[in-house]
């Protein structure tokens, strides 16, 4: 990998860290056992197909930008406590992962400078 490619990947990663987005869906997705084992792209394809067919719908959406701006949506119906709990847990996990990446980048920068 060329240095310019490495910097490009780093830039993509930093831009991805600038916001956190969590979407919670409900509905039906037809999958075979093992169809998505370790294959996030395959699951995304199945989810996109199910959305296009009207088999799933988004019930909760949260987006938080690095500057503190946020969007939050909760459907007027079909949302239960378990769904909210799961959504909040996913959001907190995303925050913690981003915090860890930022600390890693900070540590690497400090080591490079000193």
Image (cartoon, grey):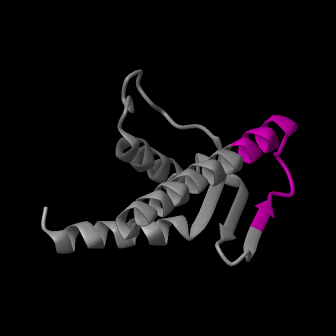
* Residue 14: percent from left, percent from top: 45, 69
Based on the picture, tell me whether residue 84 belongs to the magenta stretch: yes
For this rendering, which residue is in front, 36 or 103?
103
Q: How many marks?
A: 0
Location of residue 24 with respect to 63 vertically, above or below: above
Quadrant for the N terminus in the image: bottom left
Q: Residue furthest top?
A: 33
- Looking at the image, the residue that sits furthest to the left is 2
Task: In this rendered view, identify the residue nearer to me: 40 or 93.
Answer: 93
Q: Residue at x 74, y 72 (%)?
A: 70
Q: Is residue 35 above or below residue 59?
A: above
Where's residue 6, x and y in %? 24, 66
Q: Position of residue 31 (x, y in %)?
A: 44, 30
The residue positioned 64% from the left and 73% from the top of the image is 66
Quadrant location of residue 76?
A: bottom right
Please report the residue visible at 38 percent of the width from the left and 29 percent of the height from the top. 37
Question: Quarter of the image containing the C terminus?
Answer: bottom left
User: Is residue 36 something that shows in the picture?
Assistant: yes
Q: Is residue 78 left or right of residue 38?
A: right
In magenta, the rendered stretch is 72-89
Give 23 or 50, whichever is nearer the viewer.
23
Q: Is residue 41 left or right of residue 52?
A: left
- Left or right: where 88 falls relative to 25: right
**39 in the magenta segment:** no
Asked whether residue 57 is in view, the answer is: no
How far across and how far down the image is residue 20, in percent? 61, 62
Residue at the image point whose x is 71% and y is 61% from the top:
62
């Amino acid at each position: 990998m060329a240095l310019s490619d490495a910097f490009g990947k780093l830039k993509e990663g930093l831009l991805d860290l600038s916001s956190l987005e969590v979407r919670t869906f409900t509905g039906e997705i037809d999958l075979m056992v093992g169809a998505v084992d370790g294959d996030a792209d395959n699951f995304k394809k199945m989810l996109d197909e199910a959305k296009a067919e009207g088999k799933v719908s988004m019930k909760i959406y949260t987006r938080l930008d690095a500057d503190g701006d946020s969007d939050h949506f909760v459907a007027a119906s079909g949302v239960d406590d378990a769904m909210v709990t799961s959504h909040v847990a996913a959001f907190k996990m995303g925050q913690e992962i981003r915090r860890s990446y930022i600390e890693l980048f900070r540590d690497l920068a400090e080591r490079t400078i000193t």
